[in-house]
Image (spheres, coloured by chain):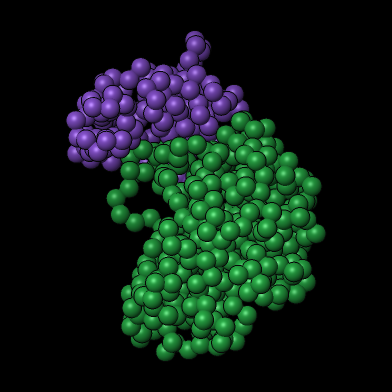
Amino acid sequence: MRSLRGASALVGVADDASPTGELQDSGRALEARMISEALEDAGLSLADVDGVCHAGSSMGLAEYLGIHPRFTDSTNTGGSSYEVHVEHAAAAIASGLCDVVIGVYASTPRSDRKRGGGFRGGPGMMMGPNPMAEWEMPYGLRMPMGPYAIAATRHMSQYGTTSEQLAQIAVSTRQWATMNPKARYQEPLTIEEVLASPMQTSPLHLLDCCLVTDGAGAFVMTSAERARDLARPPIFVLGAGTCHDHSMISEMPDLTVTPGAISGANAFAMAGVKAGDVDLLMGYDSFTITALLHLEDLGFCAKGEGGPFVEDGKTAPGGSLPMNTNGGGLSYTHPGMYGMFLLVEAVRQLRGECGARQVDGAEVAVAHGSGMVLSCMSTIVMGTEATL
Amino acid sequence: MSQTTEDKPKARRFEPPVSATTQDFWDATRDKRFLVQWCTDCQKAIFFPREVCPSCLGSSLEWKESTGRGQVYSFTIEHRPQNPNLEGPYTVALIDLEEGVRMMSNVIDCDPDQVSVGMPVGIAWEPLSDGRHLPMFAPTGNPTATGGDR
């Protein structure tokens, strides 16, 4: 396989969220604002853009912006869509299909609910005919948390993982959120508070679950050569990998092993890094169990040892593996398909822009997206110029 | 007892649609017969039923009556159902059937707190509003079980 290592870079990022959980704008207007901010961050303009990624319709977005891209990607793998978009954009740039690619996401479920208009402004996640109606929906499994709960039960039964260990992930993540002024929740959290929060679908408590907030973000990518002439230090794509193995939870082969074991291994191999080289993990935390599975599948600890691994705060500020330093989907923001925020935070950390929550000397970061119900994993390894 | 099948309004749950491919499966549930699809070439059971075998893409498929026995692979207890017609807590489980396939179902006739990974279960049926039945599972070797329409 031809390597994408160092051929392209993330050169502009933007995101928005609010402690109220709500944003003023929505839909295309919010997407356009994110794109504008990301392009400004990069020192580029819309006229430079010749590639578009959007998990709903890249054609609709390009039409709205009045641009005529020669690379287009409307892939929707749920929350991991944006890592997949970076992978595809990196390949397109490396092969000369295009030069400057934008990707964007905006979703405002919280405001939409208040306005009474249902879900607006975010790409849909359930499209086309679906055997789920016949084989899962009759049984009253709560979505999306039910499938993750079933995975957690299995992990507990097979490996002795405890609710306290899962709660520690929420607690460590909240510690990071206390240093993000845009985070929905910024007050410290205890394991006892997580365990005392209402049981939703066992064994997941309310505080094992991500937020439902408005949020949006965008990225700009270009070739390594062009990236070096731009406004910010380029953050290079070192490796990328994607894998999916089911769409319904009842079809997942082993509920304790996600396809991240494959996407991660491939991305790490392309990047030439090992788990020990990673300074920052942005691991999709739709639920505490989701993040725990990433730690195992990406090789930060052995399979089944995620619980003991997180117990002493390894993923918290000051720990050996900073994870979800923006406060994550658990405490920062989660508008439904959260993967964009993994990329944005990873880039900002590697640039050294994160203020109080900055990870000192971060050179290698991993953005690991999870889509649908542990279905599609996509791993992006990125690094500073020093890592090339 | 979290979930019984008596005295409930019809169509309280989401009722599964029937496709051309699954017509035989659902018709058999009218007689409380539980069919599993098999590939005659691979000699492997297939679930969910489909048009081709997911191992060989062949279309030489047949229905065989299942033993209806299996065990709980994993589960969750729903405390706050999305469907307002359902009353929690109840158990949603993945069942590994003896035939080597897995399906989602509910474990009924059993306090949710008594359900465990590896628990042996057998087929039970809940009536649907159109004469079909929805396959569910109950602990086996439980002579005091009530409420399951079996």
The answer to whether A43 appears left or right of A46 in the picture is right
The image shows residue B133, relative to residue A100, as above or below, that is: above
Above or below for A290 versus B144: below
Task: Report the front residue among A364 and A40.
Answer: A364
Name the residue nearer the viewer: A367 or A268.
A268
Q: Position of residue A54 (x, y in %)?
A: 41, 70
* Residue at x 43%, y 49% (from the top left corner): A244
Residue A215: in sight, yes or no? no
> What is the quadrant of residue A42 in the picture?
bottom right
Q: Quadrant of the N terminus of chain A?
A: bottom left
Residue A48 at x, y = what percent? 43, 87
Residue A309 seen from this side:
yes
Is B33 located above or below residue A214 in the figure?
above
Which residue lies at the image location 71% right of the left edge and 75% below the top edge?
Answer: A352
The residue that appears at 33% across and 78% down in the rendered structure is: A70
Residue A78, position as x, y percentages in the image? 45, 58
Q: Colour of chain A?
A: green
- Judge left or right: residue B5 versus residue A340: left
Residue at coordinates 74% horizontally, 69% vertically from top-left? A361
Q: On screen, A234 above or below B26? A: below
- Indicate the colour of chain B: purple
Relative side of A216 to B48, left or right: right
Q: Quadrant of the C terminus of chain A?
A: bottom right
Q: Position of residue A148 (x, y in %)?
A: 54, 44
